[in-house]
Image (cartoon, rainbow, N blue to C red):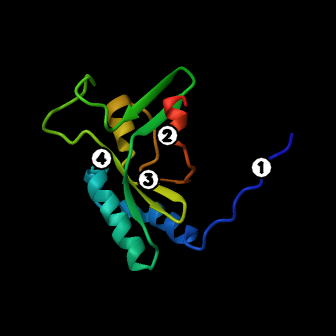
Amino acid sequence: MATLPSAPLPPSAPLIHQLARDFYAVVPTDYRTFCAFTSQIVQKVLEHFGVSCQRVPCQLWYCQPRRIHVLGFLGPSNPAYKPDKWDGHVVCCADHILIDAATHHFEREFGLPVPWVVTTPMFGFPTTALAGL
């Protein structure tokens, strides 16, 4: 079976992975579900080291063979909706790497084991694919 060639890692990848590894050694773990705050910390650290970083609002999906768990922007129809709580999620994107330091929501809300910080290559997903066009 043929495999697709992987893109070379950007020069910032070691810094991004180091930040992910050490994030909660410096940031109190009480903030594991504060995505707006943790993404701001990630952005400030990366920018301090000269790496451009954008904070991006998004939905976060945890996919299993028979179930998909979704966080962020679900609206009032969500049984866990709380009008006094922000119904969203935000991650950081730097050099085509997505960094999320608030994945603990999946453990807290669904009992799913997840790493506290996730880094993964970004990929484009055209909105027309979501619309079925």
Using the image as rendered, state which of residue 52 and residue 117 is in the foreground. 52
**Mark closer to the observer (1, 2):** 2
Using the image as rendered, state which of residue 133 and residue 124 is in the foreground. 133
- The amino acid marked with disc number 4 is Thr
Name the disc covering residue 117, or none. Answer: 3
- The amino acid marked with disc number 2 is Thr
Q: CA distance from mark 4 to mark 3?
A: 11 Å
Q: Which comes sooner in the sequence, label 1 or label 4? A: 1
Residue 97 at x, y percent in the picture: 53, 59
Q: Which comes sooner in the sequence, label 1 or label 2? A: 1
Q: Residue at x 57, y 24 (%)?
A: 65
- The amino acid marked with disc number 1 is Leu
Q: Which residue is mark 2?
A: 127
Q: Which residue is mark 4?
A: 33
**40 sits to left or right of 11:** left
Element assignment for label 2: helix
